[in-house]
């Protein structure tokens, strides 16, 4: 199935790609993350094209391309491999690519590929949870462990907006506390928080 972002036709020379990833294997609360790409693309046709800050319609300047919504295997490992294949395809194209999940786990196979193409890549992780357990519900690769797996790839992670931490993750607060900003602290000192984020990102790819 193919639903184009903003309802626009694909550009023949795109600089921006949108890749839907309807992946759902490890959700532990509400189900339905696999439907998110379809719903996001569907409602995007109701958005305005015009950007009030640049006074331009970005799609006219950049050109957008939307990948078809893939059908993932019912096998967890095979589905992860399918995501890696899609990530490889778009990393090779060197487009500015937005991957639309799906559960948080999709970040791991995508970043596993992208670090080969963009050495020094960093992750700004916007979430209410750290997602740095070592294991959750008998699995080492899932939505609650994904950022730990990403860090094990050697990719630096900065978490912003955190609201709660599991007891298992308390070691992360000690070892990587400077790379974590809780939601309450961001609200108290937004300027300081954004400065820390900027210092973390530097000039490298993220």
Image: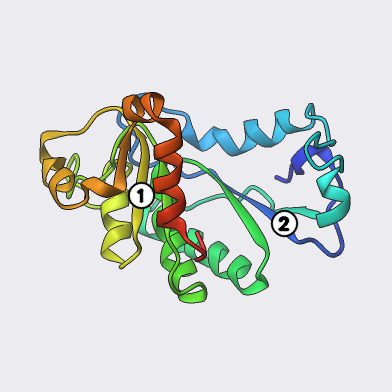
| Residue 136, placed above or below residue 119 | above
Q: Which mark is residue 16?
A: 2
Q: Distance of mark 2 from mark 1, alpha carbons?
A: 25 Å
Task: Name the image quarter holding the N terminus.
Answer: top right
Whichever of callouts 2 and 1 sits on the residue coming sooner in the sequence is 2
Instruction: Return the x and y of residue 101 as percentages of the image width and height.
Output: 52, 43
Rendered residue at 63%/57% (across/down): 97
- Between residues 185 and 143, which one lies in front from this camera angle? 185
Asked where in the image residue 8 lies, by quadrant, the reply is top right
What residue would you read off at disc 1? 158
Residue 6 is left or right of residue 89, and the answer is right
Q: Nearer the viewer, mark 2 or mark 1?
A: 1
Rendered residue at 21%/33% (across/down): 165
Rendered residue at 77%/44% (across/down): 4
Mark 1, residues whose alpha carbon is within 10 Å: few (<14), some, or many (≥20)? many
Q: Secondary structure at mark 1?
A: strand
- Between residues 164 and 202, which one lies in front from this camera angle? 202
């Amino acid at each position: 199935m193919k639903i184009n972002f903003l309802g626009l036709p694909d550009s023949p020379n795109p600089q921006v790609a949108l890749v839907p990833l309807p992946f759902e294997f490890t959700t532990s609360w509400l189900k339905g993350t696999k439907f998110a790409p379809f719903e996001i693309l569907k409602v995007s046709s109701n958005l305005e094209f015009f950007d009030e800050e640049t006074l331009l319609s970005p799609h006219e300047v950049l050109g957008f391309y939307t990948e078809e919504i893939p059908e993932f295997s019912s096998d967890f490992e095979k589905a992860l491999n399918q995501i890696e294949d899609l990530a490889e395809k778009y990393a090779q194209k060197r487009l500015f690519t937005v991957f639309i999940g799906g559960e948080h786990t999709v970040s791991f196979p995508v970043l596993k590929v992208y670090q080969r193409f963009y050495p020094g890549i960093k992750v700004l992780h916007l979430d209410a949870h750290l997602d740095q357990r070592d294991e959750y519900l008998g699995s080492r690769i899932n939505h609650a462990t994904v950022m730990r797996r990403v860090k094990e790839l050697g990719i630096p992670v900065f978490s912003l907006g955190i609201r709660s931490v599991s007891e298992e993750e308390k070691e992360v607060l000690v070892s990587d506390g400077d790379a974590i900003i809780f939601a309450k602290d961001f609200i108290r000192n937004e300027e300081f928080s954004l400065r820390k984020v900027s210092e973390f990102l530097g000039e490298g790819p993220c």
